Amino acid sequence: MTRPSPTIWASAPNRRIEVGRHTLVYRDLGPEEGIPLVLLAHLGATLDEWDPRFIDALALDRRVIAVDLPGVGGSTGRVPGTVAAMARVVEEFIATLGLAQIDLLGFSLGGFIGQQVTLDAPDLVRRLVLAGTGPAGGAGIDRPTGGAYIYWDMIRAVMAGTDAKEFLFFPRTPTGKMAAKAYLARLRERVMDRDNPIALSSFHRQITVIRAWGRTQPQDLSRIDVPTLIANGDHDRMVPTALSHDMHARIPGSALIIYPESGHGGVFQHGDEFVDAVRNHLDTDS
C-alpha cells in the first residue's frame, strides 16, 4: 500500500513506531522519492516547535521526518542521559524506518546529536545542517542553560503571557520583536493532534545532558567529511555564535551563514533565506 504523503505540517498526522524499548512519535511528510531529511529539535522542543513555513517549503519536493526522542512529547521512556545515547536512538529510529541514507538537520541540542550521528555513522548521513549549535567542549555551552538570565527570561515570558522563546530566541529590537511574534503565531497554526508538552523532569534532564556536552573533551570534527552547512544568528546568547565559527574552521569544506541582528532563532527570523540556503545545500551535486 502506498504511504500517504501529506505536504502540510499543520495537518500531517502524528505517527508512532516501536524503536527498541520505546514508542517514538514522529511526523513524516512530502514525496517518497529521494533522500529524506530528518529533523532534530532544540532543548525542550516537541514536534510542535518546528516552524511550519520552513517544513512546508522543504516538503514540497522532498520527504521530511521530524521525531520526538524518548521522554519528549508523545514518545515514551526517559530522556537519554548523554548526547551519544540520543544519537544511538536516532540511528535506531532511522534503521527501523528502513532508511539506508538520510540528510540530517539539527537545531541547537539537535545539532549536538547531529554531529554525533555523523561521527558515529558517516555512511548514514549524506548532507548535514547544523543550526544554532556548537561542538562538544564548546566554551559557554555549559553555562547559558544554567545562567540566571535564562530563568529570568522564562519568568518574563510568564508575566507577559507569552512563550519564553520570544525572549530567548529573538533580540529585543523592533525587528526581533516582530519576528518573534510572527514565529510564535506560526507555531500555533496547528490545532489538530498537537504533541504533548515536554515534562519538567525531561526538560531538566536535557539541561544536564547539554551541560555535560559543554564540559566534555572536544571531538575531532575533521572526521565529518560530508557536505555541511552551519547557520546561526550573530548574537546567540544560548549557544554562542563564536562556536559556529569554530565548527566551520574544524569541519572541512563546511559553509557558514551568520544572519544579522538575530539570536538563537536567527534561522527562523531569517526563515526565507534559511529555506533557500538549506534547499541549495541539499540539492547541490558534489
Image: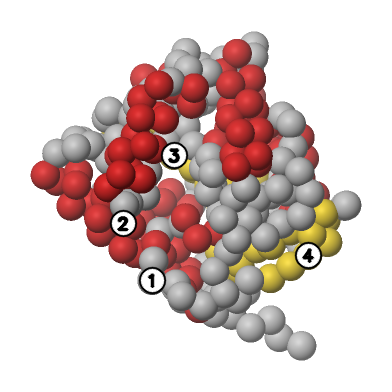
Horizontal arrangement in the rendering, residue 279 relative to residue 271 (left or right): right
Check residue 120 in the rendering and tell me which mark sits there, or answer none: none
Task: Decide which of tag 4 and tag 3 comes sooner along the chain.
Answer: 4
Residue 19 percent across, percent down from the top left: 83, 56
Instruction: Tell me if mark 4 has few (under 14), some (14-19) or many (20+) residues whose alpha carbon lies within 10 angstroms of its own.
Output: some
* Three-letter code, disc 4: Ile
For marks 4 and 3, give the CA distance.
27 Å
Q: CA distance from mark 2 to mark 4?
A: 29 Å
Q: Position of residue 231 (x, y in %)?
A: 38, 37
Q: Which mark is residue 17?
A: 4
* Residue labelled with disc 2: 183
Name the disc covering residue 189, or none.
1
Q: Earlier in the sequence, mark 3 or mark 1?
A: 3
Q: Residue furthest front?
A: 159
**Residue in front for this viewpoint, 104 or 280:** 104
| Whole-percent x, y for residue 6 in the image | 54, 79
* Residue found farthest to the left: 174
Q: Pointer 3: what residue? A: 131
Residue 87 higher or lower than 276, as above or below? above
Give the residue displayed 22% in from the left and 51% down from the top: 179
At label 2, the amino acid type is Tyr
